[in-house]
Image (cartoon, rainbow, N blue to C red):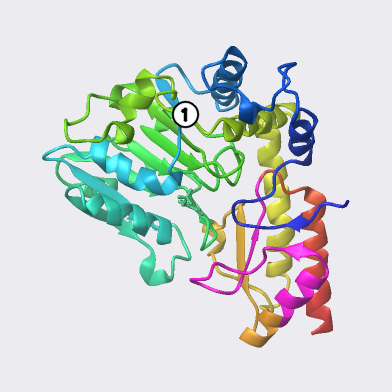
Amino acid sequence: MTRALNFNAGPAALPEAVLQEAQKHLLNFNGTGMSVMELSHRSKDYEEVHVGAQQQLRKLLAISEKYEILLLQGGASLQFSMIPLNLLTKGKIGHYVLTGSWSEKALKEAKKVGPTSILASSKEDQYRSIPSIKIEQLEGDGAYLHITSNNTIYGTEWKTYPSSSIPLIADMSSDILSKRINVDQFGLIYAGAQKNLGPSGLTVVIMKKDLISTPPDHLPTMLSYETYSKNQSLYNTPPTFAIYLLKLVLDWVESEGGVEVIEKRNQEKAKLLYDVIDKSDSFYSGHAKPDSRSNMNVTFTLPSEEKTKEFLHLAQEKGFVGLNGHRSVGGCRASIYNAVPVDHVAQLAEFMKWFQVRS
Ligand code: PMP
């Protein structure tokens, strides 16, 4: 069977080689006569998967020993709460930059925990850009500065990260592992796995060890980073199969040549689509301002609602999946995460050109 031309925003395309590998070992992993799903999470065979995934991520992103890699559940959305519950300690302020719905949601949860401030926002600009920020405006005793590195819905992405005296926290759900980063710039990075890392059900947190401290007594055990850190993310049963797929995806990234190669490929893929938009004489309008464009989520509109509907309908007929924009903003969105092949993006670019000519 041929694989779908999958442009879903998440859960999203996984590398075909990873799915084949998982299929090959589904009934008998490592000679155990069981699938990974059936292994005890306390077994030696599973431990190798668990630790192997953490080590491979450490290697690919050059994460130093100053950082802990935690494997959690609850999606990126639970991190919106866990971050303030653990780090927004008495007398401190959680600073947020608003660049879309996900950062708004992160802020909403923090407000339930303690004082917050909005350092900058591009809301008035319909979240078309990453706002410039004035670090000197960080007032009071800041606990952290929170950003969303890639805005999945609006299709914008930070190109450089702010630096200040307080820990920088980034929701990298939709661009982790898509490009090289310097982890040392961050206090904490978190990501739901279902875009660039694997299936849903797993959240990866990369956290500076010195930010992990004994939580207040009232904090439930499962909401404390210390619990995961002290127990190698095995305090309770982790999502073992999702972690296994994470390991396979990370091995795939390495076999492709590592994050640097993936980054170049992602730039090439994004350029294919942005070039069509830019050369379309405004038939296609990109939502994001050029200097804030995401290499992961390409968002655009057509001249009318009617044309958009026709475009999406015909695209679906030709086998393109997931091109409708997020339900909150409409329009179109092509999510081109690591596992989406260049060839699929080239086919979409050709389809867009063909659709414009026939219109
Ligand atoms: N942050 C970003 C940037 C996202 O794209 C998403 C999901 N699309 C979330 C947070 C929420 O993630 P989850 O569904 O894993 O809670």
Q: Which residues are magenta?
A: 310-337
Does 241 appear above or below 28? Answer: below
**Measured from the top left, where is residue 102 in percent x and y?**
42, 56
Task: Answer few, some or many: residues within 10 Å of disc 1's Cα (few below 14, many 20 plus, some between 14 and 19).
Answer: few
Q: Is residue 312 magenta?
A: yes
97 vs 73: above or below: below
The quarter in which the C terminus is drawn is bottom right
Q: Which residue is pictured at 69% across the width and 49% down the height?
A: 13
Q: Evaluate whether residue 133 shows in this view.
A: no
Task: Please indicate whether residue 186 sits to the left or right of residue 221 in the image.
Answer: right
Res. 242 in view: yes
Q: Quadrant of residue 221?
A: top left
Instruction: Answer with the quarter of the image where residue 274 lies.
Output: bottom right
Q: Position of residue 291 (x, y in %)?
A: 53, 57
Relative image position of residue 138 (x, y in whole percent): 22, 46
7 magenta-colored: no
Residue of label 1: 237
* Residue at left offset 33%, top offset 33%: 222
Q: Residue furthest top?
A: 44
Percent position of residue 93, x then y: 19, 45
The amino acid pointed to by label 1 is Thr
Which residue is depicted at the point 61% across and 23% down? 39
Quarter-of-image position of residue 28:
top right
Tag count in the figure? 1
